[in-house]
Image: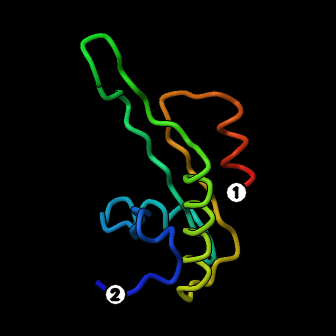
Amino acid sequence: MGKYKHPMLKVLDVSEEKDPEITKAFCENSIPGDVFLSIIAPYVGVKISPSKEVMASIGISEEFGVETAIEQIMECGTNCKTLYLLLNSPGGLVTSSYKVARA
């Protein structure tokens, strides 16, 4: 495995969409220069004990992850004029939404 340019790339799980149906739908409904970044949270929590479940949340490392992904998009030679952030979450607090919007 090669060297990482940015420390966040060690933990960042980002890839370009490969499903042709999804990419076709986005291409048909967007204009050249539009780029979409999706963050998809699981709909169910993870049971960590018989009575406790934890859910996905956005913290400081995720904020830096979004910024790193944006930097990657800009560096990869795309003709990005508009970046849309699509956040798929089963819920959450206003503060976590604000964190993502600021990044």
Quadrant position of residue 54:
top left
Query: What residue is disc 1 on?
Result: 103
On the image, which quarter does residue 46 sit in? top left
Give the amino acid at mark 1: Ala
| Res 56 label | none
Which residue ends up furthest to the top in the rendered image? 51
Tell me residue 66's x, y (percent): 58, 60
- Going from N to C along the chain, the mark reached first, 2 or 1, is 2
Q: Position of residue 94 (x, y in %)?
A: 70, 30
Q: Residue at x 35, y 27 (%)?
A: 45
**Which one is nearer the viewer's eye here, 5 or 93?**
5
3 and 96: which is toward the camera: 3
Residues at discs 2 and 1 in contact (Cβ within 8 Å): no
How many numbered discs, if any?
2
Q: Residues within 10 Å of mark 1 (few under 14, many from 20)?
A: few
Kindly give the residue lying farthest to the left in the view shown.
50
Secondary structure beneath label 2: loop
Instruction: Name the residue rendered at 55%, 68% in the picture.
Output: 69
Amino acid type shown at disc 2 = Gly
* Label disc, if present, on residue 2 of the rendered structure: 2
Q: Residue at x 66, y 48 (%)?
A: 100
Residue 90 location in percent, x, y? 48, 29
Say above or below: 78 vs 36: below
Horizontal side, residue 15 vs residue 88: left or right: left
Q: Quadrant of the N terminus?
A: bottom left
Residue at 37% across, 66% down = 17
**Number of residues whose C-alpha sits closer than 10 Å to that of mark 2, classed few (under 14), some (14–19) or many (20 or more):** few
Q: Is residue 22 left or right of residue 83?
A: left
In this image, 22 relative to 57: left or right? Answer: left
Whole-number angstrom distance, CA of label 2 to CA of label 1: 27 Å
Image spot of residue 11 (x, y percent)? 42, 63
